[in-house]
Image (tube, grey):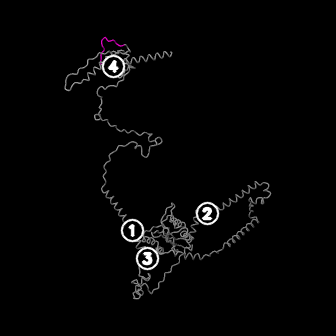
Amino acid sequence: MTPEEIKAQVAKAKAEVLAKAQAMAAARAAAASGSTPIAGAPMPAAGVPNMDAIRQRAEALKARMASLSKVPAAGSTAPVPRAAPVPTAPAPADPRARGGLGVDVSSMISRDEAGNLIITAPTGKGAPAFATAKVNQKAEPKKKLEILEVPEDYTDVTKNPYYDPNLGSGMAAPRERRPRPLKMAPKGKFTAIANQIRAEERMEQLRKEIEESGQANIKEEDLQLKDGFQKRDILKEGVEWWDAAFLPNKTYNDIKDGHAKIETEDSLITHYVQHPVPIEPPNERANAAAAAKPRPLMLTTKERKKLRRQRRRELLKEKQDKIRLGLLAPDAPKVKLANMMRVLGQEAVLNPTEIEMRVRQQMAERLQTHLDANAERKLTVEERKTKEQKKKEEDLNNGIHVSVYKINDLSHPQKRFKVDTNAQQYGLTGIVLMHPIFSIVVVEGGGKAIRQYKKLMLRRIDWTDNTRLDGTEVSETTDNKCLLVWEGQLRERQFKQLKFIKARTDAHLKETLARFGVQHYWDLALGFKEDEMLGAEAGL
């Protein structure tokens, strides 16, 4: 088929479609006007519009519109005249005047006299089938929330990164709220709670009263301190405290008046002579046993070295005699790289590489022998502990020594750690009493351990350093110091271990020391001055 034939067929198809549309438009217009076909009127040819029929229908429509515009007056009952129907041409009966696939052409499409298409908007026919006002509309039923089952992928952490297993799968959807039953409190529940709160308040108030009374006791009664000494009774001017017991009126005029308690029955002075009970000196038995043993001769360093040379010379001479008699095999020559050529001679010249390897092997064997001997003589952990314990016991056999220290402030945790740890390492026992005014440290043990601990307390620890490891200040005390109050010997230990006790009141402190029979240590520390410790510092 040629291109010209294709174009002719396309044009023919377009003409047929246009003719069908025009015929359907004319039929729709005639049906809308309600006209009937005029008898004897010629039928338009298929596909050609009847212009006369169109004009007649237009005139009939105009007359009808004019009659409808004339509205009758109010209250009149005269009927409105209706326009006579205008005969119109009949609609084409051609079955081809339909749309594609047998669908009628829309009534909104028509043509004017010039043949142009006219598309009109649809006109409303009657009221809608539903209510337009909101109040007249029926209320739509509420949709019920349907809770679906939780899928498996939802609870899988690998597939759902937003799932929290701590909440559980039951939290995925809201739960139905259930009414909670009314719970009645048992009788006496809130009364018991109130009584418990009152008891706690009474205990807190009692604790505060005890602390306040303890502070008052420290300030007024037990520790009336001034310049490091305990206050005596207030005496009149010129009267010494040791004479006050003999003066009833606390004045020396009592001697002139004869009122002094010197020769009276209640006087402290009598004709009896007080003989102290003889007490065996501490460690007298140990000293007697040590005196029974012959003491070794003390030699100087030069004399000890001379005796060592003589002893080693005798051993070497004895070994040489045994070798001459054939009792011992002679020792192998001690060859080193320095004397290899001189000792081996011609053999070292012929094969120096082999001789060097042999010499190095001998040197390694001698070193290993030396290391093995040292390892064999080395003590094990248990043997070392036993040796240290034996030395501590020997130190204790020489006597129990005790020392008392006075420290202004012992609140620094690092200082307390050093005091405690070193006492345990030296095998010392005692007590550390921390008081608001000052603290005392009492340690007892062997003489050598007490000397080492004395160096720690008076020399090694910097008591003026109040800085923690993190840089914060423990206290604002800048003149903190440690003083040696007293040191001496005891017959036996008074403590079984080193204890730290925080005493708030003077009575509590004295009671604690009285349990061990050393309450006099507090009196010594109370009246001790720094000037009295110059001899102890010089002894270091």
Where residue 322 appears, as percent x and y from the top left, is 74, 66
Assess whether mark 1 and mark 3 are in contact (beta carbons under 8 angstroms): no
Q: Crowding near pointer 1: few (<14 within 10 Å), some, many (20+)? A: few
From which residue to which does the magenta span run? 34-44
Of pointers 3 and 1, the one earlier in the residue sequence: 1
The residue shown at (35%, 43%) is: 176
Q: Nearer the viewer, mark 2 or mark 1?
A: 1
Q: Assign a secondary structure to mark 1.
A: helix
Q: Nearer the viewer, mark 4 or mark 2?
A: 4
Q: Which residue is mark 3?
A: 231
Kind of residue at disc 2? Leu
Q: Crowding near pointer 4: few (<14 within 10 Å), some, many (20+)? A: many
Of pointers 2 and 1, the one earlier in the residue sequence: 1
Left-right relation of 75 to 92: left
Compute the Cα span from label 3 to label 2: 59 Å
Compute the Cα span from label 4 to label 3: 137 Å
Kind of residue at disc 4? Ala
The residue shown at (34%, 12%) is: 43
- Decide which of 381, 97 is in the foreground and name it: 97
Of pointers 4 and 3, the one earlier in the residue sequence: 4
Q: Nearer the viewer, mark 4 or mark 3?
A: 4
Q: Assign a secondary structure to mark 3.
A: loop
Q: Which residue is mark 2?
A: 379
- Decide which of 496, 330 is in the foreground and name it: 496
Assess whether mark 2 and mark 4 are in contact (beta carbons under 8 angstroms): no
Tell me if residue 448 is in the magenta stretch: no
Where residue 499 appears, as percent x and y from the top left, is 48, 67
Q: Which residue is mark 4?
A: 29
The residue shown at (47%, 17%) is: 7
Q: Assign a secondary structure to mark 2.
A: loop
